[in-house]
Amino acid sequence: MAVLVTGGAGYIGSHTCLELIAQGYNVVAVDNFCNSQPESITRVKELAGKSFPFYEIDVRDESALDEIFKNHDTDCIIHFAGLKAVGESVKVPLMYYNNNLLSTIALCSAMKKYNVKRLIFSSSATVYNGANEMPLTEKSLTGGCTNPYGWTKFMCEQILRDTAQSEQDWSIILLRYFNPIGAHISGMIGEDPSDTPNNLMPYISQTAIGRLKCLSVYGGDYPTNDGTGVRDYIHVDDLAKGHVSAIKYSTAHTGTEVFNLGSGVGTSVLGLITAFETASGVKIPYEIAGRRPGDIAVCYASAEKAAEILNWRAEKSIAEACADTWRWQSLNPYGFKNKL
Ligand code: NAD
Ligand code: UD1
């Protein structure tokens, strides 16, 4: 039996494929490389010390999915494939709704056809309403998303809940990630944004390596310890392990279950910059700029439910995440490409 990983060449997918193999699972991965490089799969195979089937397909392509389900005995899916750039989703919302919703629907249809009923879905803390108190629990209010990307996650969650409701034997786990950072300790795989990064950590690391000149800190007047925004950063290796814990849980449970995957600890923008400077020995040039529209001051998880039920907790520190990011960035200044 195999775990089918969609979006397996991406940032979180590649780390999760590696973790699954390390824990003895058979992996089949698919990706259309719309936001990743084939080199990522090559490196995962190298790090794992073994090969695994990989298919370049679009998850919306039902006949391509048919072939995969026919050729591989699959008992569980992890669905990472999706578009994730918030700003882009505001400019081209239909592309986001088309890709993220239709890929989820096509996948569930194929699963139903081939009687595979266990799915782990990549959701996001972005589905929580901005008015919630911190920390966010799985019962906090959702909806009121500020951008189309967030709505696609909100809508996919609903599609998946309804699917699980329709037949008793579905097991669907919605994992709401907080802010994934870091890279595999080898420095061989990591986050490789195709455009100028929107997220803080890749912006910091590309500034450190000299690809970007200066980091804008979005807002210095928030009601936080140092005035900058606070988020819950989680090492991508911990996140990968969280997926394996979710798979284990899903073997013995049906219905839909939601888990936050976060550390439960908030770190400010200046806090992350300082940690990165300490880990890398490189000074990060930054300036305090205006607030970014749609941002909230503070966002962090309650990680209790995942600890109690999945027996999973984030273990790696911010310092380790910064050291690992810097190793990845300095060994691969242009990511998986040799140059821009
Ligand atoms: P990523 O862009 O690195 O990985 C997504 C992968 O999916 C890419 O390799 C892309 O080529 C592939 N893909 C997209 N659409 C596809 C399609 N239709 N068919 C086949 N492949 C397709 O992103 P990531 O950071 O690894 O995120 C993985 C998932 O987690 C996404 O669904 C994302 O929305 C979600 N998520 C990410 C974060 C984050 O901060 N990284 C936070 C919360 C949720
Ligand atoms: C962003 C997305 C969110 C997504 C999450 C994880 C937005 C509005 N939200 O959230 O949907 O789920 O990433 O992928 O984009 N910052 C700077 N300078 C920068 C970049 C960021 O100061 O160049 C600050 C932000 O204002 C924020 C913090 O750093 O306070 C983290 O930002 P980011 O990495 O974009 O994550 P989120 O805002 O949590």
Image: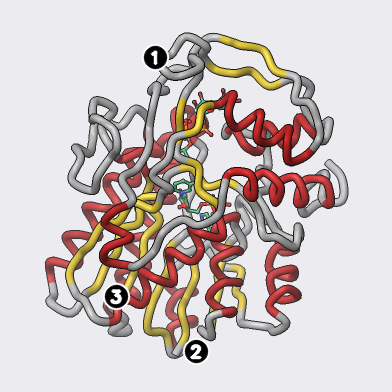
- Above or below — where is 14 with respect to 132? below
Dot 1 alpha-carbon crowd within 10 angstroms: few under 14, some 14 to 19, many 20 or more: few
What is the quadrant of residue 75 in the picture? Answer: bottom left
Percent x, y for residue 67? 48, 82
| Residue drawn 51% across the image and 17% down it | 226
Q: Looking at the rendered structure, which numbered label has been put on residue 250?
A: 3
- Of residues 140 and 89, which is closer to you in this image? 140
Which residue of the protein is positioned furthest toward the right in this rendering?
339
Which residue has dot 1 on it? 223
Q: CA distance from mark 1 to mark 3?
A: 40 Å
Dot 3 alpha-carbon crowd within 10 angstroms: few under 14, some 14 to 19, many 20 or more: many
- Above or below — where is 215 with respect to 143? above
Residues at badges 1 and 3 in contact (C-beta under 8 Å)? no
The disc labelled 1 sits on which kind of residue? Answer: Pro
Which residue has dot 2 on it? 71
Q: Is residue 167 visible?
A: yes
